[in-house]
Image (cartoon, rainbow, N blue to C red):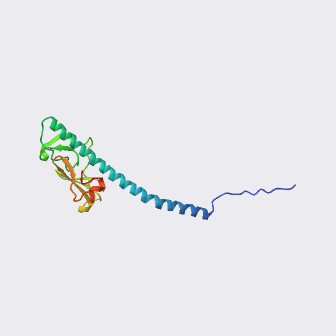
Amino acid sequence: MNTIRIKKIKKAFTLIELVFVIVVIGILAGVAVPRLAATRDDAEITKGATMLSAVRNALSIERQKRILSGNFTPITGVGDATNVFNHFWTGTPSMETNILVLEYPEPSSSGKYHWSYIDASHTVFCLTKGCVLPEDTIKFQLINGRFNCIQPHANSGHCSILGITSDD
């Protein structure tokens, strides 16, 4: 009798194939990770610009409501040290109204891309963690019921990061 020997063939990846796949994955990760970090920064700046727009709209609506009811008391503040955009003020912090600026107040924080309370009429948007230096912030001031960027040269400075032009 003839015995036929059947050879079992094991299929597997070679070491070179595995190294090649690892190198390709490393290259893809090296390209993708910085792109994702930039996308996150863009999203945080867009969130800040949206928050600014919402606060400006709330101020405009509150001003109009007050004028229609015959109340010409100016709005002098929009928050406190705990929450940047909390309640409208009509004078000192003790003159806080019960009217919310936003449905959910924004906590005051000095973190990167967060709003930070300075005083009754001054607020900053932090561009870096800690926002210590003047170039780390975008400064806003509540002037005559309007929330204005107070950087010199709005078109060329930090104000333009949030999409603010000198006409705003």
| Left or right side of 163 for 73 | left
Residue closest to the far right:
1
Residue at screen point 36% across, 52% down: 43
Q: Nearer the viewer, residue 143 or 41?
A: 143
Image position of 11 (left or right of 41)? right
In the image, taking residue 53 as reference, residue 12 lies left or right, namely right
- Residue 142 pos. (x, y %): 18, 50
Number of dots carrying numbers = 0
Q: Residue at x 22, y 45 (%)?
A: 86
Q: Is residue 26 above or below residue 94?
A: below
Is residue 64 among what the camera can see? yes
Q: Nearer the viewer, residue 39 or 15?
A: 39
Residue that sits furthest to the front in the current view: 167
* Residue 149 screen position, x and y as percent: 22, 54
The one nearer the camera, 104 or 54, is 54
Q: Quadrant of the N terminus?
A: bottom right
> Who is closer to the viewer here, 158 or 155?
155
* Residue 164 location (% of width, % of height): 27, 53
Residue 130: tell me if it is visible: no
Residue 64 picture location, percent across and down: 19, 39
Above or below 39: residue 23: below
